Image: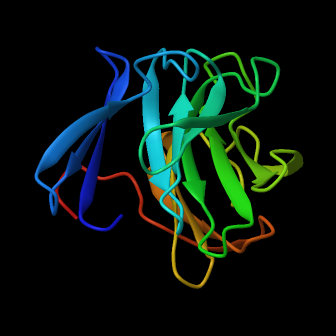
Amino acid sequence: FQGRIYLADSVEAVIRVFDVPNGRHFKIGDGDPGKLSKPLGIDVDRNGNVYVADTSAKAILVYDKDGKFLRRIGDAKWFDRLANVTVDPKGDRIYLVDIGGVASQQHRVRVVDAASGAPLFDFGKRGAAPGEFNFPTNAAVDAEGCLYVADTLNFRIQVFDRDGRVLRTFGEIGDGPG
């Protein structure tokens, strides 16, 4: 966002912000309220708000562009293993990736209303068919609103519309580059 680089430091439990245009560095999530436990995924919305997927807290913590804590979305009941967060370019939806676990069927994406933080719907479950996941880890939304999910142990990327319908998949297991 505006020349800034965001880095999740899960050892120190902070987000490091390198504000390149202004030649400064600062941390997010190192104090209360909004202290981070184990940050993994990060996204920034069009207003500069920073969304952090904290896997230990099993919640999304939201900060303004200067690092001031704004709110918390979710709790331990929402996720098995929260891994990533991405915000829709329209700014009205947040996509949360639940990596699940070996004994869990909750390998899914949870869609949340950006304004209220309320869950809208979930999609996906453990499996190998289109729309199913085996340890999804990351997600990103393109300018048209398509959601790309790294379906890690199915060795593919799945592309969804904003309502969770599969548009296409690509990738497969291999033994070399490409």
Give percent across and percent down for residue 7.
Answer: 28, 40
* Image coords of residue 105 (percent x, y): 76, 29
Does 153 sit above or below residue 57? below
Q: Does residue 60 appear to the left or right of 162 in the view shown? A: left
- Quadrant showing the N terminus: bottom left
Q: How is the image coloured?
A: rainbow
User: Based on the displayed image, in which of its 4 quarters is residue 14 positioned?
Assistant: top left
Provide residue 114's location: percent of width, then percent of height. Answer: 75, 56
Residue at the extreme left of the image, as rendered: 23
Q: Is 7 above or below relative to 78?
A: below
Task: Write the residue at 70% across / 50% down.
Answer: 132
Residue at the spot 74% in from the left edge and 71% down from the top edge: 162
Q: Nearer the viewer, residue 130 or 51?
A: 51
The quadrant where residue 92 appears? bottom right
Q: Is residue 82 visible?
A: yes
Residue found at x 56% / y 23%: 34
Q: Give the tally of numbered discs.
A: 0
Q: Is residue 9 above or below residue 111?
A: above
Residue nearer the viewer, 128 or 93: 93
| Residue drawn 46% across the image and 40% down it | 41
Most extreme residue toward the bottom, as rendered?
Answer: 144
Does residue 128 appear anywhere in the picture?
A: no
Quadrant where the C terminus is found in the figure: bottom left
Left or right of 52? Residue 96 is right
Q: Is residue 3 left or right of residue 49?
A: left
Name the one closer to the observer, 70 or 125. Answer: 70
